[in-house]
Amino acid sequence: MNEDKGTRYRRAERGLRLLEVTAAGVVLLAMACSPLPVAIARRVTGAAALAPAAPLPGPLQGLAAAAVIAASLALAALAAAPFANRRLGGLAARYNLPVVSARHLARERLRHGLATVAGGALGWWVFAALSQFTPWLGGLATAALLLVVAGAVMLLAPWLILLSPRVRPMSDETTTGRLHALASRAGLRLAGLHEWVFAEQGDHANAALVGVLGPRRLLLSDTLVAGCPPDEMDVVVAHELGHHAHGHTWTRVRAQAAVLVLAVLAAQAGAAGPARWVGRTGGITDPASVAWMLVGAGLAWLAARPWLLAQSRLHEAEADAFALDLTGRPEVLERVLTRLGARNLASEEDSLLTRAFFLTHPPIPQRIAAARRAAQSTDPAGRP
């Protein structure tokens, strides 16, 4: 079979990603089934048993939960590391793509892991505390609290991003004036345009709208500002404005909120059931049950992934169509997509299974075909 370079690369890349997830999942499940979580929790607390007698879990129990999470994630990361290093290192180098060093990957995973351990331990403590008062509603109460916190962060995001040293105001008045006018045509008044320092992480050009209520700020990567002609930049920004015009942010928030509730309930089920029967833990309020909670939440996320990705692909197609309507430049969108596909080695064909579990955007050939259809239905003056 004569396959194009992009198809060969994507098949190998997705195969390695699948091996990463499988290796991490198997190790995480083995960890949950083993006596190690109970041993770690007992070691930290110094207790022979962790039956919940106090009205609130103590600090040692929170520390024990953090230790179990850290051990579980560390073992899972070690199992996945060979495949991740191969995917981002050797495979990328063979296809002349940007290479991520093993040291950089380890540093990033450590940073994300520490944040996950801290957040997970705090989340377990809140969950255990709420479960003391509402044993069967602890999961829903925890999910509701998490949604409130996430909502507050989203509302504050237009101001929080200004605290990042990687975000700076755009200084090019010609560009800012043109993009403000483009946003006004889309019915949006921007609170500000900012440049996002991205160059050291690669050459990917990107843009994003930040904010769900009140002010919206437009972020443009420095790679986009430096290397993108004005007409192509307008199409990229128009695509982002399309997400706003179609209300994709709120749709995505509702979907992710539903998945969050599902994941928390699955975690609660893992702590109440398999953690007691297989892991020999004390149940929901035992920090040793955290390993099974990770398994439950992971399975819920995996089950919801095809739905979330299908929604994402629909949103991206709608944003492309909006960009075409707003700019009237289908040939520019095709040029952007063609370069994007060549740079990222997009595959020519993708199976239904690949689309279900891997693709956040429609395949590049499909997006280019839509742009060409739009070009054929537009006269030389840009009128439909």
Image: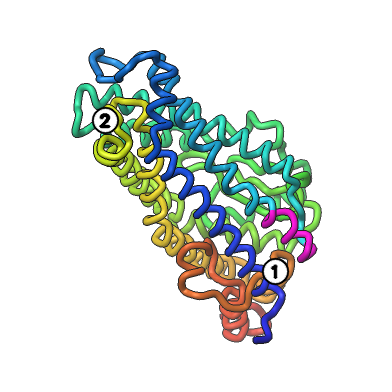
Residue position marked by numbered label 1 in the rendering: 345
Q: Amino acid at mark 1?
A: Leu
Q: Left or right of 300: which side holds 27?
A: right
Front-most of 72 and 14? 72
| Residue 229 visible in the picture | no
In terms of sequence position, does the residue under pointer 2 or pointer 1 come before the other? 2
**Is residue 219 depicted above or below 330 in this figure?**
above
Query: What residue lies at 35% left-to-right and 15% top-to-bottom?
Result: 47
How far from the left and from the top, in percent, is residue 103? Answer: 74, 40
Quadrant (top left, top right, bottom left, bottom right) of the N terminus: bottom right
Q: Quadrant of residue 293?
A: top left
Q: Quadrant of residue 184?
A: bottom right
Q: Main secondary structure of the magenta part?
A: helix
Query: What residue lies at 52% left-to-right and 62% top-to-bottom?
Result: 358
Span shown in magenta: 86-96
Query: What residue lies at 26% left-to-right and 35% top-to-bottom?
Result: 276
Residue position marked by numbered label 2 in the rendering: 283
Q: Amino acid at mark 2?
A: Gly
Query: What residue lies at 40% left-to-right and 23% top-to-bottom?
Result: 41
| Residue 130 visible in the picture | yes
Q: Left or right of 303: which side holds 316?
A: right
How far from the left and from the top, in percent, is residue 313? Answer: 49, 65
Q: Is residue 265 magenta?
A: no
How far from the left and from the top, in percent, is residue 221? Answer: 71, 48
**The residue tagged with tag 1: helix, strand or loop?**
loop
Front-most of 295 and 108? 295
- What is the CA distance from the residue labelled 2 to the residue labelled 1? 48 Å
Quadrant (top left, top right, bottom left, bottom right) of the C terminus: bottom right
Label 1 crowd (10 A; few <14 / some 14-19 / many >=20): many
How far from the left and from the top, in percent, is residue 381? Answer: 67, 80
**The residue tagged with tag 2: helix, strand or loop?**
loop
